Amino acid sequence: MSIIGWGAIIALLIVLGLVINAIRKTGNGQNNNNNDGHNHGHQHGEDCDHERADDSEFHSVHAGKDTRGGCKFNPEEVRRTRFRGTPPIDVSNLPAPDPRIVAANASVTIPGITHHLNILSGEVASVIRGKSVTIRTRNSHNAEGIELALSYVEDYYKSLGIAVKRVAYQVRGKTYYNVEAEIRGAVNPEKVVIVSGHLDSTVGSPWQNEKVAPGADDDASGTTGVFEVARTLKDLKLGYTVRFVHFTGEEQGLWGSYKYSDQCAAAKTDIVGVFQMDMIGYCGKPGNRVDIHDGEDRNGSHDLVVALTRAAKRYNLDLNVVDTHNHAVDNRSDHAGFQDHGWKAVLISIEFTDDGFDPNYHTLQDRVSAINFPYMVEIIRMTIGAVAEYAKIQP
């Protein structure tokens, strides 16, 4: 072939490469590679693009929101508000620690959380419904993987003696499931506190039927955190009902939580607060910073920030609780749908900054080996204390 012919081919290949790279751009313009913690990983598995959702699938309160998934935070918003003042939280008049919560917190251990993390992220096999299996993926489009994860969650609550059920929802004519467990309130059972996390995982291509997606931090950590809050509160007398909800479809654009919040709105559920735990296991630098996101006090959600901050101080936990007071994670986790409906809701998470975010996010490296166990234990303990108070623990 002539030199001119080879040159034309090379030019064509260069143009083709640029087109492919552009196609791989996410909705916010970031590239689908693993160069930083905010980006998606590479694609793995069968394409499920035909199952993408749009506004018509959800209640109108969610209209105009990005239902395509996406990065966990907006770094530009973080930078813009880095030095913004936050509402002061009074921690000077705290009551003495409740001995029941002290005992509950002491029961949250590194071996205990490691057990769940290892199983949920596929590090070890587990017996689920009588079979020894390994949960290699929790991708919502992988029927086998998400079914194993759903069954594991259900069976755990049954082992605790807590009422549990699957809650079905549909997107694009296909049925998916969330899991809901419930401790009924002893005084005002009609009032509901929700503790939640998302069960599904991805390695950066949520529209693919990903065969392997460990998701140890995102969000086996939150799933485990919800487990531990349920386990420690189950024998305490609480004034309000507490629901423990595990959402699927989060990585596709908050499908499960949008649908669940829509169902709660239709049922006129009296939700007094939502504590969403999403990515609570990574801390790669000193300080033990944990971010609480309330969307700048949307619907009065700052009340939950106060409850968490005071719990951390009251129980002398090794955490730097930060009220982010910005919009960096609006519509980026499962608290968002509840805020859309007017309820108080917050996201409890790792540090969402350029130098603090989990570099393993949405990659095959999101493994248990990268979890900061003492840090995660402290976040769970903080949440136990806050939820107990918010659910009106009885004398």
Image (cartoon, rainbow, N blue to C red):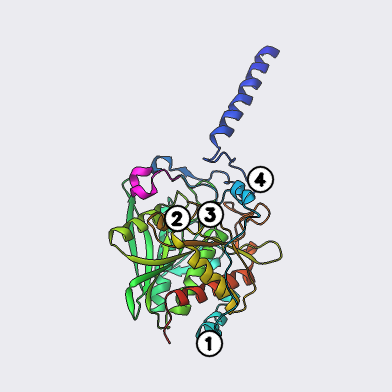
Q: First in sequence, mark 3 or 1: give its number.
A: 1
Q: Nearer the viewer, residue 206 or 385?
A: 385
The reply to whether the C-beta atoms of the residues labelled 4 and 1 are less than 8 Å apart is: no
Q: First in sequence, mark 1 or 2: give its number.
A: 1
Q: Which residue is mark 3?
A: 213
Q: Mark 2 is on which residue type?
A: Ala
| On screen, residue 203 above or below 369 | above
* Magenta segment: 54-67
Q: Nearer the viewer, residue 140 or 219?
A: 219
Q: Is residue 202 visible?
A: yes
Q: Nearer the viewer, residue 130 or 23?
A: 23
| On screen, residue 220 above or below 32 | below
Q: Which residue is mark 4?
A: 35
Q: Image point 54% across, 41% down: which residue?
A: 28
Is residue 173 a member of the stretch shown in magenta? no
Q: Is residue 192 left or right of residue 293?
A: left
| On screen, residue 394 above or below 295 | below
As measured in the structure, the alpha-carbon distance from the residue carrying label 4 to the one carrying label 1 is: 46 Å
Q: Mark 4 is on which residue type?
A: Asn
Callout 1 crowding tier (Cα within 10 Å): few <14, some 14–19, many ≥20: few
Q: Mark 1 is on which residue type?
A: Pro
Quadrant in which residue 14 is drawn:
top right
Q: Which residue is mark 1?
A: 99
As measured in the structure, the alpha-carbon distance from the residue carrying label 3 to the one carrying label 2 is: 24 Å
Q: Position of residue 140 (x, y in %)?
A: 43, 53
As measured in the structure, the alpha-carbon distance from the residue carrying label 1 to the one carrying label 2 is: 34 Å
Q: Is residue 94 left or right of residue 298?
A: right
As measured in the structure, the alpha-carbon distance from the residue carrying label 4 to the one carrying label 2 is: 27 Å
Q: Which residue is mark 2?
A: 336
Q: Position of residue 43 (x, y in %)?
A: 54, 43
